Structures are given as structure tokens and as C-alpha cells.
Amino acid sequence: MNFIIIGNGVAGITAARLLIQHVPPGSNVLQFTSEPYGYYARPKLPQFLEDNKQTPENMIIYAKDWYSKSNIQLHTNEKIHTIKRKEKKVVSDKGEYEYDKLLLALGASCACPPIPGLELEHAYTLRTLADAIAIRNQLERSQSVAIIGGGLLGIENAIACAKRGIKTTIIEFFPHLLPRQLDPEGSAIFTQLLTNFGVETITDAQVKEILGTSKVENIQLKDGRIIKADLVMTCTGIKPRIELAGKANLDVNQGVIVNDFLETSDPYIFAAGDIAEHNGRVYGIIPPTTDQGRVVAENMVTSRSREYHGSKISTTLKVADLFVTSIGYDPKQEDYPSLKYENKESTEYVKFFHENDRLKAVILLGTKKGIPHIRKMFDEPLSHHRAKLEEIFPGIA
Ligand SMILES: Cc1cc2nc3c(=O)[nH]c(=O)nc-3n(C[C@H](O)[C@H](O)[C@H](O)COP(=O)(O)OP(=O)(O)OC[C@H]3O[C@@H](n4cnc5c(N)ncnc54)[C@H](O)[C@@H]3O)c2cc1C
């Protein structure tokens, strides 16, 4: 049998590693990537920007010989542009390849707002190692950076630039930073920490235009303010790469629509990771992508053998001493009853949102205390854990 995976990110590599262990003898596993490298971890790219210590080569986790030793036929620099569903073939400029089971793990690109000037030199998005190399080269010459978007990626990139000693400003549309991870109170504390770190923040702001003749020179906001910047990074969320699936008449919405077996509307074609939309949700982060990569590999080998029922969202900011962990948080939960612990001296802020004695979401700022225990609390009544919470966070109320 021929198993084809389009994509060599977390979804693709997780599935490939499982497939090679379980496919019937004599099967072929082919993996395609439009990038020139073996597997590397995208979450490490902001760190790559911080200084010049890392070389592109030591970012690579699985070099090309790992694939050949693992019986995976890796096709780098090879973009698949067509799926011929009737013939069960995928097509690139280099050839046509037959599949019995096909996995779409093409990931996503940046969902950039339509801002005039994004086409100027030194206006970037960060998605690939090639992007990171280009940005880092330019940061060497940069005096001032503007980051459009104050979510996790925007903040990590801002900190990387500030660490290089470059004047850095985050411009955020919402009234506070990390709107999907922090409540307004937590965000205010976090913003102060960022300011101490040398990152300026402008919230409630919209970019009107990136100014410059051929290169980025300044940013103009809709309220008229001009922000000094010779380099811009847009970090405004993701857009799943659905074009290939759409062209093949598979069901698509925001992402490629999958059922609980991670099958698309064609049962021989599966999707996982940032490209996939399950129960109306595109996750865009690693933990669900890994969950889906595992489930999809099992179903590709043995049809409908394992169901996927969604993943609990948990995000962690992993830079400097700015610990932020947010589990299950959604801004709609702001009005839920909550338990709060705050230690102003050590800048710790912790909030548990609950409903009907069930934990719904947790925010931890400036601390990693009790995280393994807290993860288990979601499955049991909150009242069972009050004593333990008091032990970890004295005075929580
Ligand atoms: C800079 C950065 C930092 C991040 N940090 C975090 C973090 O700290 N924590 C977290 O949970 N998540 C983080 N994320 C998100 C996380 O990286 C993604 O959720 C994850 O990479 C999704 O994996 P994927 O396999 O679905 O897609 P991707 O990793 O995007 O991989 C897609 C693959 O498809 C290939 N491809 C695309 N189109 C084609 C085509 N037509 N033909 C052939 N190949 C194609 C690409 O070359 C690539 O190999 C970060 C993302 C970025 C960009």
C-alpha cells in the first residue's frame, strides 16, 4: 500500500513516525514538503531570532538520512499542487504519485490583515526556518521593530528583538495583550512585566498603513500616530492552507473539515494539524496537532479504529522569566465565578474559573506551581481539591 503525507511539520512527522511502525509489510510511506529541510520545531523559531548562536543546521531535529533509515521517502522542495481523487494520485512539478491513503498536513500560513505596505521590503511573517533566517539577517541592521499582533507569537518575537537591544513595539487591536490566554487583570500585570523587559505596548490600536518607498520606514495607526519601525513582523493568527483541498472539491470551511476519524469528505483522504477543522475548530497549536497526528496514523492503517474528540487548549509562553500558562481559557468565561491568588512581591497571579463545581479554565502568571496537579483537576469536582489548592496557593479565595 502507498501512504502519502503532504507536510513535514508536527502533524506530518507524528503520523509518519507511527505509520512506519504499523503499515503492512511492503508498504511505501512518502512524505512531501515544500521546504528544503528535514523536520524542525517551529516553536523554536522565535528563539532563533534572539541572537546568532543557533545555526540553521542545528535547528534540524530529523536530518534527511533519518528519513531514509526510517524507510520514509522524503521529498523536500516539492510542492504538491493537485490531488486527482478519481485516480488517487497527487501531482507536483516533479511527478505524479499514487496513494491508497493520503494525509493532508499542510499546516497554515499567516492570516495577515489587508494592510497597505505589507509588500514592502523588511515586512515579514514568521512561519518557516527560511523566514527566520531572512528576519535574523535584517535584525542585524535594524534599529526599531514593530510587531503587529499581541498574541503568543507576537510576544515571543517581541522579546527576541528586545533581547537584541532593538527598540520594540507591539501593536494590538484588542484592549489587552494575550486576549485568548489572559483575563484583563492578568494581562495588565503581564504588560507591565513586558514593559520592564523593554517592550513597548500599544493596545486598542489599528494599523492604517506601513509607510516607506521601497522599505519599511514607519507605521501609521488609524488614530494618526506614527510608530518608528524599520522592520515589521505581522503575527495576527493563522490561515489554514485549504487551497489544495478546495481545488479537489473536498469540504472546506475555515480549515479542511474532518470527522471524528479525521477523515475528510473523501474517506481515503485525511487531514490533521493546523489545516484541519474538527467540530468547527481549528486549533493552531502543538498539543492538538500531536493528538491528531497519532489518531490519524491509526485510522490510515486500520480504517475507523480510533476516534478523536477534541483537545483541551493549553498554552505556555516559554520566554525569559515570563511564565504564562493558560488552560481552557476563553474570553467568554470572564464572568464565571473564580478563585484568585495574587502575590504582588513575586508577581504571581493565578485564577481558576469554575462553574457548577467544575473547573473550566486556569491562568497562571509568574509561576509554574502545581501545574501537573491542576491538569488533573479538570476531571473531578473542584471541591475535592480546595485543600490542595490552599496548600499550593495560601489564601486563595
Ligand atoms: C514561529 C512559530 C512559533 C510557534 N510556537 C508555538 C508554541 O510555542 N506552542 C504551540 O503549541 N504552538 C506554536 N506554534 C504553532 C505550531 O507550530 C503549529 O500548530 C504546528 O506547527 C502545526 O503543525 P502542522 O504539521 O499542522 O503544520 P506546519 O508545521 O505548518 O507544517 C506544514 C508542512 O506542510 C508543508 N506544505 C505546505 N503546503 C505544501 C504543499 N502544497 N506541498 C508540500 N508540502 C507542503 C510545509 O512545507 C510544512 O512542512 C508556533 C508557530 C510558529 C510559526
Image (spheres, grey):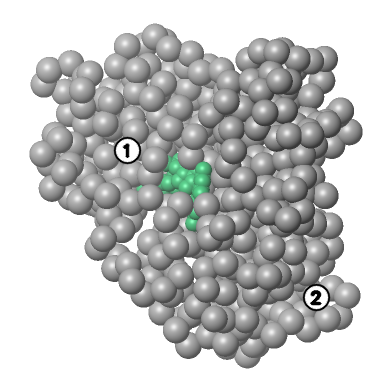
The amino acid type, in three-letter code, at marker 2 is Leu
What residue is rendered at 82% in x and 20% in y?
A: 355
Instruction: Name the quarter where the N terminus is drawn.
Output: top left
What residue is rendered at 61% in x and 27% in y?
A: 374
Examine the rendered structure and indicate whether residue 162 appears above or below residue 316: below
| Most foreground residue, 380 or 232 | 380
Mark 1 neighbour class, 10 Å CA radius: few under 14, some 14 to 19, many 20 or more: many
Residue 257 visible (yes or no): no
Mark 2 neighbour class, 10 Å CA radius: few under 14, some 14 to 19, many 20 or more: some
User: Along the polypeptide, which appears first: circle 1 or circle 2?
Assistant: 1
Residue 203: name its quadrant: bottom right
Q: Which mark is residue 52?
A: none
Q: Ligand 1 near label 1 (Cβ, under 8 Å)?
A: yes
Query: Residue 145 appears at what percent x and percent y?
Result: 61, 78
Instruction: Name the quarter where the C terminus is drawn.
Output: top right
Residue 330: name its quadrant: top right
Query: Residue 346 appears at what percent x and percent y?
Result: 68, 54
In the image, 341: left or right of 150?
Answer: right
Query: Residue 353 appears at what percent x and percent y?
Result: 78, 30
The amino acid type, in three-letter code, at marker 1 is Ile
Residue 221 visible (yes or no): yes
Examine the rendered structure and indicate whether residue 160 appears above or below residue 59: below
What residue is rendered at 65% in x and 32% in y?
A: 392
Residue linked to disc 1: 13
Residue linked to disc 2: 221
In the image, 362: left or right of 339?
Answer: left
| Most foreground residue, 377 or 133 | 377
| Most foreground residue, 290 or 32 | 290
